[in-house]
Amino acid sequence: MSSDPWGRVDETGTVYVRTADGEQVVGSWQAGSPEEALAYFERKYEGLVVEIGLLEKRVKTTDLSAKDAQTAIDHIREQVDAHHAVGDLDVLRGRLDKLVETVESRREERKAQRAKQSDEARHAKEALVVEAEELAQSDQWRAAGERLRALVDTWKGLPRLDRKSDDELWHRFSHARSAFSKRRKAHFASLDAQREEARKTKEKLVAEAEALSGSTDWGPTAARYRELMADWKAAGRAQREHEDDLWNRFRGAQDVFFAARSSVFAERDAEQSENLKLKEELAEEAEKLVPVTDLKAARAAFRSINERWEAIGHVPRDARPKVEGRMHAVERALQESEEAEWRRTNPEARARAEGLTGQLQAAVDKLQGQIEAARSAGNTAKADKLQKELDGRQALLDQALKGLQEFGG
């Protein structure tokens, strides 16, 4: 009989292993010596040790599932419980029991992790739904549309929840996207209708602008073009494919008209500048008639100047007041000379002037006689009083004589 600390072989070739529960039959060995039998079943034990060691490593260092780990443990435990190896089988059972605890702990950790991930995923999806529902009311069509597409990609990257929760959240999310798409579609349909209406309006504006482009009725046509431009701005934008073409036609028609008007105005400005030179020369000629020495000749000369003046066309608007003012100044001087001449040659006025002068002269002569008499009588006070009266009458007489001179007398 042969034995070691964990097993023995009896005389019949039966192999036993020692355990805490007593000896257990390992098997029968008839092919060789007892030592060889023990060595064979000890190698089986070493194989179980290696297998358990590998499984412990896999459990610690890989993402081996709890189910697969438990299956592997059960498989090894069957071999240990079958007592087909010689060695400390109780130690192996202890390692397997500990491994079961480790696997169970890992299972709970993963379960908690999955619960945490599920909770995070729920919160994340709920946040996506809330944002999508807010975006569904947005009028920022492009930005909101791009953001909703990004939210879909984010949703796809999140873990699934339980079917009921996931379906409910997805229904809200999908409904928000649909609501936004429906509003955006309605908006752009309305916008298309507005742009079509703007196109029709601008077609009419272009037609009128082109019809007016050959007009030479400069003022009213320019005013109408300003009205057409205001109508153009108020009409809004047409479709992109029509807007630029319509604008080019509209602007082109205006350019034709305003280019023609500018050309005509340039010619007119040149002509009016030349007219201004001529009128300034006539104003200078008229100003030489003042002061008036020969009224009849001056009036004839002014009529000649004025006839030539009227024959000249318009001058620039800003220069007109000054040059016309010079002619008016000469005309006023002639009128004042005429009035003075009329006063001088008016018989009634002359008679009144002569009568007043005679009366004043008589009064002066009388006062001078009275003053001489008062002084001869030695009445100085009376003489002084009469002298003051004489001075006043003499002043009036001098003024009357001056007026009489204007009548040539």
Image: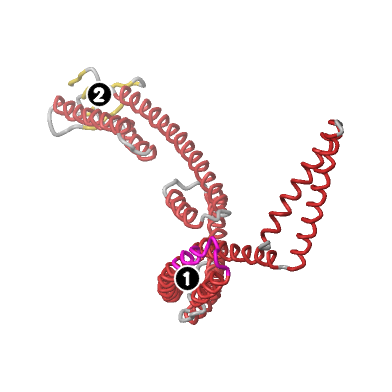
Q: What residue lies at 56% left-to-right and 57% top-to-bottom?
A: 175
Label 2 crowd (10 A; few <14 / some 14-19 / many >=20): many
Which quadrant of the figure has residue 183? bottom right
Residue farthest to the left?
A: 32
Q: Nearer the viewer, residue 307 or 403?
A: 403
Q: Is residue 246 visible?
A: no
The stretch of residues the image draws in magenta is 281-295
Residue farthest to the top?
A: 5
Q: What residue lies at 22% left-to-right and 31% top-to-bottom?
A: 47
Q: Which residue is mark 1?
A: 239
Disc marking residue 87 = 2
Q: What amino acid is labelled 2 in the image?
A: Gly
Which quadrant of the figure has residue 297? bottom right
Q: Is residue 98 left or right of residue 308?
A: left
Q: What residue lies at 14% left-to-right and 34% top-to-bottom?
A: 31
Q: Is residue 224 left or right of residue 395?
A: left
Tell whether position 294 is magenta. Answer: yes
Q: Element type at marker 2? A: loop
